[in-house]
Image: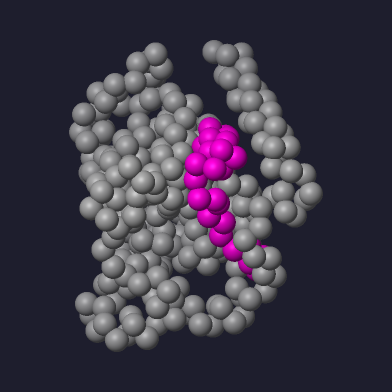
Amino acid sequence: MMKTETDSSRAGLSQKAWNPYLVGIGIGVLSWLAFLLVNKPIGMSTEISKFSGWVVGIFAGSETVANNAYWASKTPAFGYSTVFLIFTAVGAFLSAKLGNDISFEKVPEVWEEYQGGSVAKRMAASFIGGAVLLFGARLAGGCTSGHGISGTMQLALSSWLFFPVMFATGIITAKLLFRGKSNA
Amino acid sequence: MNLPIPKDSTTGLIVSAMFGIVFGILLNKGRVTDYNVIVNFFRLKDLTVLKIMLTAIIVGGLGVFAMNGFGWIEGYHIKDANLAGMALGSAIFGVGMAVYGFCPGTAVAAIATGRLHALVGFFGMLTGGMIYAFSYPWLKTNVISIGQMGKVQLNDVTGLPMIGWWVILTAAAAFTFWMIERKRTANA
């Protein structure tokens, strides 16, 4: 079993990891502030689907986006959530830089152990997995942040349905992916 | 200062940037920007994800519940419960998360830590967003319209008041954490 030893009594930025309970408290408090200061719960997948619309606009013209029933209600535009997405990346970069966690990983450890070291295979799986993930998030109306954290903490029925269902299919998928070690 | 701050104002965008930085740091320090931590959660070998999420839900939820009670915030933001869309969407999401190894938020953070396969998956996410947008009219008629319950909360559908739900959920979380840590201490 892999375990990164962490000294949970310290939580500096140069630490590679913090105590997960402390991280959870941090996200909880961040949610209070999000409600209190801007009346907007934390979420991510809506913004990524707006990026999709932005890309479509570049290649297929803005009419295609304007005429689309989905993007008509979630209009791709620079705003609060765009800044949040970009600075989530900035924060993670700073944290990884100071905590010595920058890695240009192509094939992660568990994947390699069961699916082999092929870069092309892992990249194809990442691409398809990412597409499936965001399609599912939009159909469900949110992702791990919008439903999994922000929705559940408001006792939304939709979010308490999201959690067990995605957890179940995630477990089944992991069972199928990670059985029988690869010899590659 | 009048609250809430208009979110697309300059102040709102500055607040958003600060929230983003803190969120990104927390995701990285929580190690959920690491593919192995996420998939090992689905393999039930690493409970980091569960510890973080459950703690965030309880701490965040109790705070929001209290602030709403004091009238400090402008009510809840509940997403529609469309049973068919929810069931299908959540099921698809779980499959995608186990294969990709990230969710949308942790993916953005993982890309910033250099993980190249996370970056490739981001283009996959953009593609998934496009497929969704173009199939939306069909989905809206044939899937999302089924089992619409609206913006309901657990107290609406059960009759148990919100405070009752929080007592139960807090106790359940405390018990879960106690079980996890007791087992870990016993194994050590």
Q: What x and y, as percent, mark residue B62?
A: 58, 35
What's drawn in magenta, residue-wise?
Answer: B57-84
Is A78 above or below relative to B1? below
Residue at image position (59%, 82%) is: B141
Is residue B111 among what the camera can see?
A: no
Residue at image position (24%, 84%) is: A61
Q: Quadrant of residue B179?
A: top right
Q: Quadrant of the N terminus of chain B?
A: top left
Left or right, residue B4 beside residue B76: left
Q: How is the image coloured?
A: one colour
Q: Residue furthest right?
A: B159
Q: What x and y, as percent, mark residue A68?
A: 40, 82
Is A156 above or below relative to B83? above
Left or right, residue A173 beside residue B168: left
Residue at image position (69%, 37%) is: B163
Left or right, residue B82 beside residue B2: right
Residue at image position (54%, 50%) is: B75
